[in-house]
Image (spheres, helix red, strand yellow):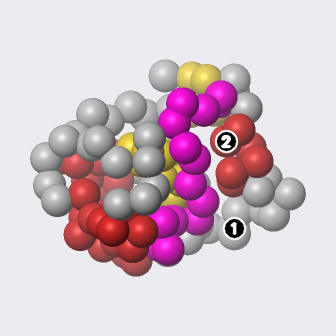
Amino acid sequence: DSLKGWHVTICEAWEQVHEALEREHFDVAVLDSNLEGEDFTDTFVKLARDHAAMRIVLTSSQFSSETLSECVREAYSHLLKPYAVENLATALDWDTPVPAGS
């Protein structure tokens, strides 16, 4: 899929996220706190640490829960839902280049 010139891979569950990461490289991942499958906090933190060069934006309708607070610390940025796609550029701080080879 494509969104305003970005190559986009949509995953509805953690299993699809893992499969996509095995197939190709991503500069950015936008992960929603409602992803189905595995424990969100444990899997998110491991993913963030295993793919440290990938900018991960966490999206959620609330960031007040104890479990999400650990994810927010590991994420590159976070967005409160609902959000406009245009907010991604701000959340990703596009003025700072993504490291080469990441």
On screen, residue 87 versus residue 64, left or right, reads: right
Spatial CA distance of label 2 from label 1 is 20 Å
Q: What element carries label 1?
A: loop
Q: In terms of depth relative to the viewer, which is nearer, 66 or 85?
A: 66
Q: Is mark 2 on a helix, strand or loop?
A: helix
Question: Magenta segment range?
Answer: 72-85
Which residue is at 30% across, 73% downward? Answer: 46
Q: Answer yes or no: is residue 23 visible.
A: no
Which quadrant: the C terminus?
bottom right
Q: Position of residue 24 (x, y in %)?
A: 41, 49
Q: Name, please, the residue furthest toward the right.
A: 95
Q: In terms of depth relative to the viewer, which is nearer, 64 or 40?
A: 64
For residue 88, the mark is 2
Which residue is at 43% across, 59% downward? Answer: 64
77 drawn magenta: yes
Which residue is at 42% across, 68% downward? Answer: 69
Which marked residue is nearer to the observer: mark 2 or mark 1? 2
Q: Position of residue 9 (x, y in %)?
A: 43, 34
Q: How many labels does the image show?
A: 2
Q: Counting other residues with Cα less than 10 Å from the Cα at mark 1, is it few (<14), some (14-19), or many (20 or more)?
A: few
36 lies above or below 77: above
Q: Where is residue 44 in the image (x, y as percent from the top left)?
A: 33, 63
Which residue is at 49% across, 22% downward? Answer: 1
On screen, residue 59 versus residue 46, left or right, reads: right
Which amino acid type is shown beneath numbered disc 1? Ala
Which amino acid type is shown beneath numbered disc 2? Leu
Q: Earlier in the sequence, mark 2 or mark 1?
A: 2
> Within the image, what quadrant is residue 7 found in?
top right
Q: In terms of depth relative to the viewer, which is nearer, 78 or 54?
A: 78
